[in-house]
Amino acid sequence: MNEKNIQFLADESCDFTVVRALRASGYDVASVAESFASASDLQVLKIAVEEKRLLITEDKDFGEWIFAHGEAMSGVLLIRFPANIRSDLGQAVSVLVATHGSDLVKSFTVLEPGRARIRKIL
């Protein structure tokens, strides 16, 4: 799969720097804040699945929806960046997508400074 074909849905908790960085790199990024404001986590997850978008979030609750409740997903990228290095956030996500894009599909990925854990969900 060509990484540029991956479409994203940025949750309201997602720093908008990430949305701007991915859009600037040519990715299709829908934003919950722009199109689905105040949607519940479950609604956001269902929208991502219906639209075949990889969900980008900073909300750990999506892990519970997927692992504890068995909800379907197209892929989730959970960002865990502390406040003191958030200036690197947009670049870190862009590099992750450029280097591991197709691996993120149907995976639950946790991105932290300096590392990413990619767990395929079958």
Image (tube, rainbow, N blue to C red):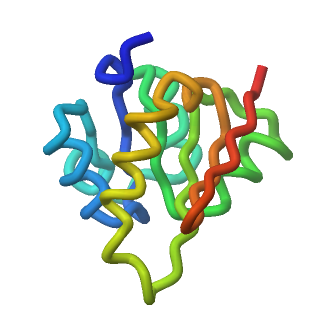
Q: Total of numbered circles in the picture?
A: 0
Q: Position of residue 29 (x, y in %)?
A: 26, 38
Decide if residue 18 is on the left or right side of residue 41: left
Q: Quadrant of the C terminus?
A: top right
Residue shown at the point (73%, 29%) measured from the top left = 120
Decide if residue 30 is on the left or right side of residue 52: left
- Work out whether residue 43 or residue 79 is closer to the camera in this orientation and state it: 79
Residue shown at the point (25%, 44%) measured from the top left = 22
Residue shown at the point (32%, 57%) measured from the top left = 91
Q: Position of residue 87 (x, y in %)?
A: 31, 76
From this view, report whether residue 102 is shown above or below residue 89: above
Residue shown at the point (57%, 56%) measured from the top left = 111
- Work out whether residue 82 or residue 54 is closer to the camera in this orientation and state it: 82
Q: Position of residue 6 (x, y in %)?
A: 37, 23
Q: Which residue is the extreme one toward the bottom? A: 84
Q: Position of residue 115 (x, y in %)?
A: 62, 57
Decide if residue 109 is on the left or right side of residue 81: right
Q: Quadrant of the N terminus?
A: top left
- Work out whether residue 114 or residue 51 is closer to the camera in this orientation and state it: 114
Q: Which residue is the extreme one toward the top? A: 1
From this view, report whether residue 107 is shown above or below residue 96: above
- Work out whether residue 84 or residue 78 is closer to the camera in this orientation and state it: 84
